[in-house]
Amino acid sequence: MFRRLSPAEAGGTPVTFRFEGREIAARAGESVAAALLAAGEAVFRASPVSAAPRGPFCMMGACFDCLVEIDGLPGCQACMTIVRPGMEVRRDRIAGAPA
Amino acid sequence: MNARLEAPVFDLAIVGAGPAGMAAAVEAAARGLAAVVLDEQPAPGGQIWRNIEASGGRASLGGSYAKGAAHAAAFRAAVADYRPGTLVWHVETADHEPARLWLMQGERVGQLRARRVLIAPGATERPVPVPGWTLPGAMTVGALQTLLKGAEVVPSAPVVLAGNGPLLYLTAVQLAACGARIAAVLWTAPPGAWRGAVPHLPGFLASGTWRAGLGLMRDFRALGIRVVRDVAAIEITGDGRAEAVRYRTAGGASGEIATGLVALHEGVIPATNLARAIGCEHLWDEAQAAFRPRLGPWGQTSVEGVLIAGDGGGIAGADAAPLAGRLAVLGAAHALGRLTLPERDGLAAPLRRDLDRILRGRAFIDRLYPPRLARAALPDAVVVCRCEEVTAGAVRGAVASGAQGPNQIKAFLRCGMGPCQGRFCDPTVTRLIAEARGVPEAEVGQFRLRPPVKPVPLTAFAAAGEEVA
C-alpha cells in the first residue's frame, strides 16, 4: 500500500522495533503508524464492537483508528507516537474482542 | 494538594504550534508576556507545516509548504517555554482567576496556570461517511499528505482520491512530484458550483490568493490525471480491506476502479473539541457547513480569558492564521495591562488590514468547493460513528424513538462516546437529526463534550504521584 521515497537507513541509523514479533526498521523521528504502513502493515487493530479490521485513517491524532498496544499499554495512537528503539508493538485488543 | 496551589502562573498559555500558535508566541515575546506553548506534536508547524524543520521545506511540496520554514525559525528564536509532545486535555476556568490547564506530557499528567489561554487547534478534515470508509486502505487525503511530509512515505500503487477542494489538488500535485501514481480523482464538486462562487469573485481577486490557486490548478491539470467529474456517490468495497471503489455521477454514469487505497477529502472544519469542553459557545456557519466558536475581534470566546485563533475559529487558511494569532495576543496584552489602548490598536491596524483582505477571498473558495458526499443522503447501513460502529439507520431509529438532540443520541446509542469523542461523527449526527426533524443544524447543535478531550490513562496520574494528589 505504501513505500518509502528512500530506505529507512538513508536518514541515519534506523530505529528498530517489533510489531507482533516482526522486526520493523523505521526512520528516527517518524510515527509508529508511518513506520508500520511503510513496512506493509495495513491492519492495526480489531474494532471493539464487531472485531472488524481497522487501520490508520486520519494520521493526525483525531480518529483513534490506529490504536495499538505499546510496551503493554493499550490504546496508544500509533500516528502520534514517535518510534523508540526496542518498543514492543502489538495490535490493540480491547477486552472481549477476538484476538 | 500543595502542588495544585503552586502550579506556575503564566500570562499566556498558547495551545497549538501551527501557523496561529507560532505567530502568537512570537508576538507574545515581543510584548513581554510570560508565555508557554503547549503542542501535541513533536515539532512546530501544525498540520500544514508538519516536519518543516527536518524537511527543510522540500521544494517538491511547493511554495505554500516552504513558507512555513521562516515561521518556524522566528518561533524558535522567540519562544522561551515550548513544550512539544504535550496534550492539553482539560482547561478549568473561573472568573477573575488564572485558568488551570491539565496536561499530559509523555506518560505523566501535569498542570499549569495562565491568565489568558489562546487555543490554536487548527482544523480536522470534514468526515466523509461513505459505505466502506472504515476499511483499512480507506483514509483521508490529509493522511496521505501527512505520511509524505512527516515520513516521506507514499502510496506504492495507484491511489484514488475522492472529493474536492484545494487540499485535494495540492496533495495530488505533491504526490505526483514524488513519483506516486494516482489512478483517478473522483471529483465531487457540482459543475454548477462556480455560479454560486462568481458573486464572490471580486473579494477573491482582491485577496491575492488567486495567484496560488491558479498555479495549483495549472500544476494539477498538467499531470494529466484521469478526473471523473460530478461524482455524486461512492462506495469503497473489499473483504477486510479496501480493494475497489465504485462511483456514480449525477448524470447516472457509474464505474469501478480496483485500488487498495482510497483517500477522501471534502474540505476541513474547525477542531472544536477543547473549546467545547471548556464551554465556549459555538454557532453554525452555513457558508462553511460547520460549527465554529463565536469570537470577538481579538479572538475572545464566550468564556472569560479563553481566546481562539486560526482555523479552529473558522476556516481561513495558513496565511490568515498568523495574523489572527497576533491580534489575539495584542488583545490579551492590553487586557493584562501591558499595552495601552492606542498602542494595541496601532499595532493591530496593519494586521487587521491584511487579515480582512485574506478573509474576503474565503467566500469564493467555500462556494466553489462545497462538500457533497458529506452532505448527501446517507444509506441506513453506513457507519456514522467509527468508534462505536453506529449506523445512520440506528441514528434515524433513535430520533424516531424520541431522541431529539445529539446528547440523547449519545445516551441511546453510545454514538460519540468512543475514544475519538465525536470528532468523526459529530457533524453527521447533527445533520441526520436535522434532516429527520426537519429543522436547521443550528437548532440541533452538537454533542456536549466533557474533559478529558482525549483519553488519559490512569497510569499517567499514578506516574505523577503526589504532585496532583
Image: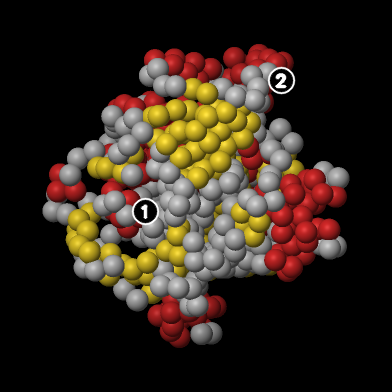
Tell me which chain the residue with mark 2 is part of: B
Determine whether, in the image, residue B231 is placed left or right of residue B10: right
Q: Quick check: B438 above or below B402?
A: above
Secondary structure of the residue carrying numbered label 2: helix
User: Can you identify the residue that label 2 sits on?
Assistant: B196
The structure's colour scheme is secondary structure
Numbered marks: total: 2
Percent position (x, y) of residue B247?
56, 33
Q: Foreground mark, 2 or 1?
A: 1
Q: Marks 2/1: CA distance?
A: 41 Å
* Mark 2 closeness class: few <14, some 14–19, many ≥20 residues within 10 Å: some
Q: Which residue is mark 1?
A: A42
Q: Position of residue B171 (x, y in %)?
A: 42, 32
**Foreground of the two, B425 or B342:** B425
Q: Are marks 2 and 1 on the same chain?
A: no
The structure residue drawn at horizontal position 66% and vertical position 56%, both measured from the top left corner, is B391
Asked if one can make out residue B58 in the rendered structure from this viewpoint, the answer is yes
Q: Residue at x 52, y 69 (%)?
A: A48
Q: Residues within 10 Å of mark 1 (few under 14, many from 20)?
A: many
Of B234 and A91, which appears nearest the observer?
B234
User: Can you see residue B365?
Assistant: no
Q: Chain of mark 1?
A: A
Q: Quadrant of residue B104?
A: bottom left
At which x and y percent is residue A74?
41, 72
Residue B346 in the image: above or below residue B227:
below
Residue drawn where x is 53% and y is 17% of the image? B210
Which residue is more in the foreground, B329 or B393?
A: B393
- Callout 1, which amino acid? Ala
**Image vertical order of residue A32 relative to residue B208, above or below:** below
Q: Where B344 falls versus B387 (above or below)?
A: above
